[in-house]
Amino acid sequence: WSRGLGDVYKRQVEYVKQLTTMVLSRMEDKHRNMTEVFRFMDERGKGKVRKQDFVAAVERMRISLSREDITKVWNYIDS
């Protein structure tokens, strides 16, 4: 039983890693580097990116993800 749950967890983690790679790659394709990606997300110029900034950036980039997947990616990169 617990082995099955471990496999499910591993698949979920791998899925989130793949989503994160896709999102950040798409953003980096449109900007020169990750610093520019950060600046793109930090619209307020505060040196911080909040979840709502990240969500807005994903939407502005027209990256098709569900809100649930956006939250998963945010939680992964914010940890």
Image (spheres, grey):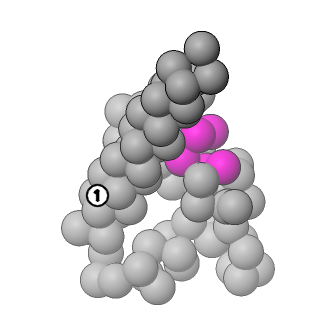
Q: Position of residue 54 (x, y in %)?
A: 59, 54
Q: Secondary structure at mark 1?
A: helix
The image quadrant that residue 62 belongs to is top left
- In the rendered structure, which segment of residues is drawn in magenta? 71-75
Say which residue appears at 36% left-offset and 33% top-offset.
Answer: 64
Q: Position of residue 71 (x, y in %)?
A: 62, 39
Looking at the picture, does residue 38 appear above or below residue 56?
below
Is residue 72 within the magenta segment? yes
Where's the N terminus, which quadrant? top right
Q: Is residue 14 visible?
A: yes
Residue corresponding to mark 1: 26
Looking at the picture, does residue 31 appear above or below residue 72?
below
Say which residue appears at 47% left-offset and 29% top-offset.
Answer: 7
Is residue 54 within the magenta segment? no
Looking at the picture, does residue 42 appear above or below residue 64?
below
Amino acid under label 1?
Answer: Arg
Q: Is residue 42 left or right of residue 19?
A: right
Say which residue appears at 23% left-offset and 67% top-offset.
Answer: 29
Where's the C terminus, which quadrant? bottom right
